[in-house]
Image (cartoon, helix red, strand yellow):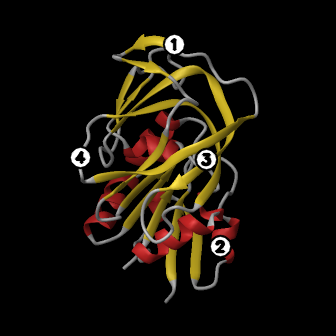
Amino acid sequence: MNHRFVVFRLPNHGQNEFKKLQKLSGVGARWVRPQDFQGGAQVIILPGSGKTVADLDYLRSSGGEAKLRLHLASGGVVVGICGGYQILGETLLDPFLKQGDRRESEGLGLLPVTTLFGGPMLSCMTTGTLLVGEGAGGSDIGEEHRSGYSKRTRRSTRHASLHKVACRDFLKPRPAVREPIEGFKWRPGLERYDGLVSADRRVWGTYFHLIFNNDAFLRTFFASLP
């Protein structure tokens, strides 16, 4: 069966981290501007972003949010990576105005997380144990480059953590913990768990760049596709 992937081309997305995905047998993966997406894909990927709030605004102004919601309503799957994961959350807090001129923005509300943007960047290679699906128990390795710290807003059986973090190899010193801001501490690099996936396996979010380079994740993900 041919699995059809679309990566939404956002103005501030990072490097093309989907080369391995594009080379997999039985997979078609292409980049499409949100306004040009006409359906026909099983999976939409929201990639990482250098400016999450600006890309969220672009997604909305281009009609991409409406198309993404229609995609989900029609049985499709959405994966958010780093900035894309943050966009899928409920609220984006920017008390230091690192992202623009708004201190708070409403996310898409598809995953129960709030993200707070701090000052310095976290940069590390992270190894995590996959917690869900056929690849559960396997190791995934990803890159994390972010100033955002995401906190789960509620606990429920409708969403599960994607990884338990085994170790982080910091490429530069880990940012210092800040005192409580907007109700919680900014603690990037100290998270014990990464990402979330909905119980129906329709909405996925992770901070792991290069997630599709991992065999454990691929086993779980492709087994969950209709």
Residue 63 visible? The answer is: no
Upstream in sequence: badge 3 or badge 4: 3
Horizontal side, residue 172 vs residue 71: left or right? right
Q: In this view, does 55 lie to the left or right of 18?
A: left
- Residue type, numbered disc 2: Gln
Residue placed under numbered mark 3 in the picture:
13
Q: Name the amino acid type tagged 3.
A: His
Q: Where is residue 114 in the image (x, y as percent from the top left)?
A: 36, 33
- Characterize the local packing of mark 4: few (<14), some (14-19) or many (20 or more) Cα atoms within 10 angstroms: few
Which residue is denoted by mark 2 in the rendering? 22
Q: Where is residue 9 in the image (x, y as percent from the top left)?
A: 56, 55
Sequence-wise, the earlier of marks 4 and 2 is: 2
Question: Of tags 2 and 3, which is closer to the observer?
Answer: 2
Closer to the camera, 189 or 181?
A: 189
Do tag 4 and tag 2 residues touch (Cβ < 8 Å)?
Answer: no
Q: How far apart are marks 3 and 4 (CA)?
A: 31 Å
Residue shown at the point (67%, 57%) measured from the top left: 17
Amino acid type, callout 1: Arg
Label 3 secondary element:
loop
Q: Residue 156 carries which label?
A: 4
Q: Which of marks 1 and 3 is nearer the N terminus?
A: 3
